[in-house]
Amino acid sequence: MAASVWGNPQSYCRLWRSTANGLEGLAALHNDGLLILDELSQIDSREAGEAAYLLANGQGKTRASRTGTVRKSSQWSLFFLSAGEESLTALMAKSGQRSNAGQEIRLADIEADAGCGMGIFETIHDQLSPVSMALSLKQFTSQYYGAIGIEWLNQVVTHRQKIARFVTDIIQNFVDTVIQSDATGQIIRVARRFALVAAAGELASRFGLTGWKEGESFAAAKICFTAWLEAFGADGNREDRAIMAQVRAFFESHGASRFDSANHPNNEKIINSCYAQSTLTNHIF
């Protein structure tokens, strides 16, 4: 859906299945634009954290030329979206790594569930089910794409002197609305990114490109930011979440090869056995 704003979704979306060097080239290619990456789990879990820094920091690795001098590094400024079945924290835990706050604010995870019992959707309009809604969106975005993004850019360039104050005011209003007085700099940094998205959407509506009511883009960005903040942990639960992700990854990686049920053994050989005890059932595994 997001890709259809700028081009054909089939070709505009890219995959995470790449090395850090490959992502560097993709980032440079999408300079001053939007980079959309799908299937986060396809990148090597050992490189995922570095990739988050790479894309967000806007500069490639420093490399030496054949003569030993420093070659010019690639540079970019972009927004990037990522989709996947697991978070950055969970992916890194598979290789025994713990994500830090710097990585998590660069790749802000939002649960793909709107909380309305319809997956990512809050409403399915006249469709029969969330599945038919998704298929309908896929059908129409494969036919109609690219025009809105170009027209939005044309309007921004034409009215750039007038909209600067509007964008600044939207960003400040958004931050003031969603941020508590004791918020950390990291949380404010993420809030400003969501605020910029809100401002872009409000501009698109003013330009007559969306059909949305005034304030709708602002409200949508606020919902997404709130979901991120609840998961990230304004109350200090980020470390707990990282620990749980590592434990979950250990179970998923080793399963029956390291664990057996004391009450219902499978009589298979367990190598480097571990055990866990359920606090609910008092079962030992």
Image (spheres, helix red, strand yellow):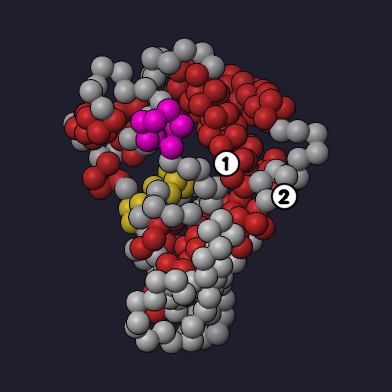
Residue 6, picture quadrant = top left
Name the quadrant of the N terminus.
top left
Tell me which segment is drawn in magenta. Answer: 113-120
What is the secondary structure assignment of the residue under circle 1? helix
From the top left corner, tell me how far across and down residue 65 is, in percent.
Answer: 50, 80
Identified by mark 2, the residue type is Gly
Q: Which residue is mark 2?
A: 236
Near-viewer residue (264 or 163): 264
Q: Position of residue 26 (x, y in %)?
A: 39, 57
Above-or-below relation of 184 to 67: above
Residue 255 magenta:
no
Q: Is residue 48 left or right of residue 14?
A: right
The image quadrant of residue 207 is: top left
- Report if residue 114 lies within the magenta region: yes
In the rendered image, residue 190, in percent from the top left (x then y), is placed at 62, 42
Residue 228, disc:
1
Q: Is residue 81 visible?
A: yes
Tell me the SS state at disc 2.
loop
Q: Residue at x 38, y 19 (%)?
A: 209
Q: Nearer the viewer, residue 213 or 162?
A: 213
Residue at image location 59% in from the left, 66% down from the top: 98
Q: As displayed, is residue 157 above or below residue 25?
A: above
| Name of the residue lying farthest toward the front | 263
Residue type at mark 1?
Trp
Which residue shows up at 38% across the image and 14% down it?
211
Name the residue at the right extreme.
182
